[in-house]
Image (cartoon, helix red, strand yellow):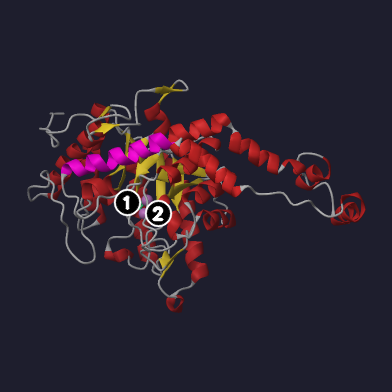
Amino acid sequence: MKKSRPHFPRIKPIAYAGPSATTALAFRHYNPDELVDGKKMSAHLRFSIAYWHSFRGTGADPFGPGTIQRPWEKGTDPVSIALTRLDAAFEFCQKIRAPFWAFHDRDIAPEGRSLAESNRNLDRIVAHAKDLQRATGVKLLWGTANLFSNPRYMCGAATNPDAHVFAYAAAQVKKALDVTKQLGGENYVFWGGREGYETLLNTNLKREQAHLAAFLHLAVDYAKSIGFKGQFLIEPKPKEPTKHQYDFDVASGIAFLRTHGLEKHFKFNIETNHATLAGHTFNHEIEVAAAQGMLGSIDANSGDLLLGWDTDQFNTDVKELTLAMVSILRAGGLGTGGFNFDAKLRRPSIDPEDLFHAHIGGMDAYALAFKLARKILADGKFESFVSDRYASYDSGYGRAIAKRRTNFRELNKLVLGKLGEPKPRSGKQEYLENLLNTYLHG
Ligand code: XLS
Ligand code: NI
Ligand code: NI
């Protein structure tokens, strides 16, 4: 493979310079090579670059066209442009020190006039991606299929009222699974782009949900048949682009998977901005998934609480991330998952250098949160407060309740007898919030 000219010639690989770094193009907290519990920090955090935002995003919004023009987007042949763009992306992953990337099929290769042509385009790009992965050591966190941009999917893919569209989506996902496997993808994501409805006046909700379940079962079967071992992930989102998406949040995702016998095959890819759109905190969604052993991966971004859509911003909110990290570490980490920056530059952030500032900010905020969360867990103050709060369930009749070895009659007897009225005990929220601040701000 011939080495291409650098696409970010003025930028050297980003180095760790510590909290007192004097340059902006340096990490203050993310030190990829630092050993933490015998493992490099980069292996704990498993950062990933989202191809669609960072290499296909143009800054376009409903009110105007793109503002971002990259120097490598030149020429007329879409496949050659796609190949050069991939070179730029891998150079970026290396320079930003991200060990992983993630893509949709149609981000990396142009869609052709037929599925066969689209597949041929994809094969050419994937062959190049394989070479680049080998040359740089950057690995694939997950692959996915774009089942929402092409007009054929305007009424959904697996939930489309037309079985022809379902079949097309199946063929597309078959290929996306093939290429994800070829590239050693560690996961495969299902985000239900337009799997939802705009109006119940034209929708059979029950049938659509059953079709979605059928689609996921067929995907599980196909993955098994080709020996794809990656983890399947559902990415919940309550709305946008449809008014109501079926994979609304983690709780409804769990109910859906269980209802249709899919729970063994899926975990969750939790996106911060989707959590807040669903009226939850990021931390809440992580806890709900972790409670069922279904925490898979994170789409790392942030919304704007004043706006009702998926703004996909880089997250620099150390408090929010520290709370999330405490839950993630307590759950035993993300396994084959990682932190994928499903985040985009703001429309006026047009310099290639802005891609670096954005990711440095996100990676540093996560790394700092990781360190703070480790300290919080090592100190164990919150843990012991919480376990103490539930201690009455550890012995006696409380334990019998937890083990379901009692009944209403017995409990009734106890309350009427020696127990009497419960003694209220403070929840100490303010004390705990202050305690949290001692970690965040000293
Ligand atoms: C959109 C989703 C999307 C998925 C991948 O809101 O976040 O980017 O992560 O299809
Ligand atoms: Ni996402
Ligand atoms: Ni999103």
Asked whether residue 30 appears in the rendered view, the answer is yes
Given residues 42 and 307, the one toward you in this image is: 307
State the residue at coordinates (50%, 48%): 283
Which residue in the protein does label 2 denote? 273
Tell me residue 129's x, y (percent). 24, 37
352 vs 309, left or right, is left
Q: Is mark 1 within 8 Å of ligand 3?
A: no
Which residue in the protein does label 1 denote? 313
Image height of 296 relative to 252, above or below: above
354 drawn magenta = yes
Question: What is the magenta segment's predominant secondary structure?
Answer: helix
Given residues 332 and 153, the one toward you in this image is: 332
Tell me residue 350's x, y (percent). 16, 49
Q: Quadrant of the N terminus?
A: top left
Residues tagged 2 and 1 counted as in contact (Cβ below 8 A)? yes
Q: Is mark 2 within 8 Å of ligand 3?
A: yes
410 vs 332, left or right, is right
Density class for disc 1 (Cα within 10 Å; few <14, some 14-19, many ≥20) is: many
Q: Secondary structure at mark 2?
A: helix
Considering only order in the chain, which callout, 1 or 2, is on the residue closer to the N terminus?
2
Asked whether residue 292 appears in the rendered view, the answer is no
Given residues 296 and 60, the one toward you in this image is: 60
Specify the segment rendered in magenta. 352-369
Image height of 69 relative to 63, above or below: above
Q: Amino acid at mark 1?
A: Gln
